[in-house]
Amino acid sequence: MDLHESAETNTVTAIFELPGLKSEDVAIEVHGNRLTISGESKLSENYDKDGYSVRERSYGKFSRSLHVPQGVQVSVLAA
């Protein structure tokens, strides 16, 4: 996560890089004064190697919460 504050525009920008995740695997929620980014990665790879069929899987959940100061409005932009 990269966090940038601009006094000139009175904004705070949080940038999250989530390689390999689809937008439907990520949730962005605001509850009260807390911004939460959470998601789940599900990677599966199948291939043949030296006459064997190989299947590799990787699963994991993540969550990151940030305190948002009182009076600050949150807007979400996805790239």
Image (cartoon, rainbow, N blue to C red):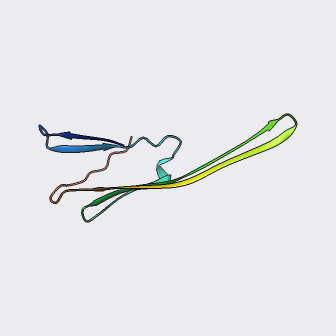
**Residue 4: image location, x then y, percent:** 25, 39
- How many circles with numbers are drawn on the protein? 0
Asked which quadrant contains residue 11, the reply is top left
The quarter of the image holding the C terminus is top left
Residue that protrudes farthest toward the top in the picture: 50
Q: Residue at x 42, y 40 (%)?
A: 17
Residue that protrudes farthest toward the left in the picture: 8
**Residue 43: image location, x then y, percent:** 62, 47
| In this view, 4 is above or below 76 | above
Residue that protrudes farthest toward the bottom in the picture: 32
Asked which quadrant contains residue 49, the reply is top right
| In this view, 35 is above or below 2 | below
15 relative position to 73: left or right: right
Q: Residue at x 78, y 43 (%)?
A: 54
| In this view, 34 is above or below 76 | below
Q: Residue at x 36, y 43 (%)?
A: 1
3 relative position to 9: left or right: right
**Residue 8: image location, x then y, percent:** 11, 37
